[in-house]
Amino acid sequence: MADNKGVITAVGRKKLCMAHAGDIALPVITQMAWGSGGADETGQPLDTTGNEIGLYQELLRKDIESHVYVNEGQTTCRYTATLEAGELDNSYISEMGLYDEDGDLIAYRTFMRKGKDADIPQIYDMDEIF
């Protein structure tokens, strides 16, 4: 079983390769999505493959609120979005992803189930690491 629960998808890697070659402009990451399909029946995160093209059980997708570079070398970008009070109330979230402006899943992550209370916002950060 792999330790890595997050990955840049095959589609994301293909777009990076093609952009580096000058054949396409790299689409901007614009949205974060949350889902409930990232854990097994015991609540443990599923391993990622890199071949994911979408969340297994997407619950909500929202625009990215902000991003920051979290290291001096600017090789890790942290994207932030918030589940507001009233969004996904009483849901259990166990997967998230970053989508580009073309609607393609670029990065995918699984984690232990997290409950969402109705009256409490939850801020999610997802790092894209190079």
Image (cartoon, rainbow, N blue to C red):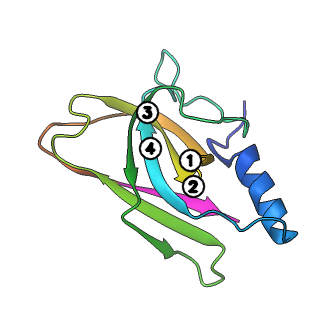
Q: Is residue 63 above or below residue 66?
A: above
State which tag comes first along the sequence, 3 or 2: 3
| Left or right of residue 12, residue 90 in this image | left
Task: Give the residues drawn in magenta, as a range.
Answer: 124-130
Q: Under tag 4, what secondary structure?
A: strand
- Mark 1 neighbour class, 10 Å CA radius: few under 14, some 14 to 19, many 20 or more: few
- Mark 2 neighbour class, 10 Å CA radius: few under 14, some 14 to 19, many 20 or more: some
Q: Please say if the residues under marks 3 and 1 sit with CB atoms less than 8 Å apart.
A: no
Q: Nearer the viewer, mark 3 or mark 2?
A: 2
Cα–Cα gap, marks 2 and 4? 11 Å
**Can you tell which mark lies on residue 33?**
4
The amino acid on which the numbered mark 2 sits, given as a three-letter code, is Asp
State which tag comes first along the sequence, 3 or 1: 3
Q: Residue at the left extreme? A: 119
Q: Please say if the residues under marks 1 and 2 sit with CB atoms less than 8 Å apart.
A: yes
The amino acid on which the numbered mark 3 sits, given as a three-letter code, is Gly
Q: Is residue 26 above or below residue 32?
A: below
- Mark 4 neighbour class, 10 Å CA radius: few under 14, some 14 to 19, many 20 or more: many
Tell me where residue 32 appears, x and y as whole percent. Answer: 45, 50
Q: Under tag 1, what secondary structure?
A: loop
Residue at (80% x, 53% y) in the render: 14
Cα–Cα gap, marks 1 and 2? 5 Å
**Residue picked out by circle 3:** 35
**Can you tell which mark lies on residue 100?**
2
**Can you tell which mark lies on residue 103?**
1
Is residue 129 one of those drawn in magenta? Answer: yes
